[in-house]
Image (spheres, helix red, strand yellow):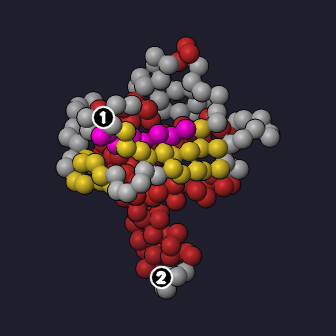
């Protein structure tokens, strides 16, 4: 949390110096502030990873969450030549849970999809699709990509803590996503 506190402190100081809400620098600093605060909450969640937490009880609209996630990653994806498509369920898709934790799940899944498609050969489609749907009374979120898929040998261990196929991966992304989804009574 110490590095995040420093980032938050400096972003707040810089934000106070920038005037005008339409200034791109102000908007960028606002994103830094909100994402740093979210990162601090994620760190707290990591610290409690070993023990089962409560899912929370606020209303979370999954279509809106998926759209926010898409906006958050859109610039990075554009820089990497990755197309992001959204398929939203018609009408609202509410669930009860912890907004920050569910957002973290979506970001973890999209991050894995980015990793899967960024190394594809030139000319291969680099596409990620973020889907929200209602199926049989259940709220469903899918993150699909055009990457090679999970090798059969890794399918049993992909959700295990500390398992990663990434060179600099911590192996916690999918393990945390699974814990959060299961704490919410869901399935991944």
Residue 35: percent from left, percent from top:
43, 58
Q: Is residue 71 above or below residue 172?
A: below
Q: Which of the 4 image quadrants contains residue 45? A: top left
Position of 132 compared to 59: left or right? Answer: right
Screen quadrant of the C terminus: top left
- Towards the viewer: 115 or 45: 115
Residue range in magenta is 137-144
Mark nearer the N terminus (2 vs 1): 2
Q: Quick check: is 141 in the magenta stretch?
A: yes
Residue placed under numbered mark 2 in the picture: 21
Quickly name the residue at label 1.
186
Position in image of residue 103 (x %, y %): 39, 49
Any part of residue 107 in sight? yes
- Of all residues, the one furthest to the bottom in this rendering is 20
Q: Residue at (51%, 50%) from the top-left corner?
A: 87
Q: Is residue 36 magenta?
A: no
């Amino acid at each position: 949390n110490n590095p995040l506190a420093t980032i938050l402190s400096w972003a707040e100081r810089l934000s106070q110096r920038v005037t005008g809400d339409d200034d791109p620098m102000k908007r960028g600093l606002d994103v830094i502030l909100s994402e740093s605060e979210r990162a601090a909450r994620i760190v707290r969640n990591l610290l409690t990873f070993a023990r089962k937490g409560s899912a929370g009880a606020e209303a979370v609209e999954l279509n809106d969450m998926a759209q926010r996630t898409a906006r958050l990653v859109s610039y990075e994806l554009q820089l990497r030549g990755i197309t992001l498509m959204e398929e939203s369920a018609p009408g609202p898709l509410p669930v009860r849970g912890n907004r920050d934790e569910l957002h973290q799940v979506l970001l973890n899944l999209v991050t894995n999809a980015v990793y899967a498609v960024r190394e594809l050969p030139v000319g291969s489609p680099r596409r990620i699709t973020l889907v929200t749907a209602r199926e049989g009374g259940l709220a469903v979120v899918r993150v699909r990509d055009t990457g090679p898929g999970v090798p059969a040998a890794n399918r049993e261990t992909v959700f295990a803590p500390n398992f990663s196929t990434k060179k600099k991966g911590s192996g916690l992304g999918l393990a945390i996503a699974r814990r959060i989804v299961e704490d919410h009574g869901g399935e991944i």
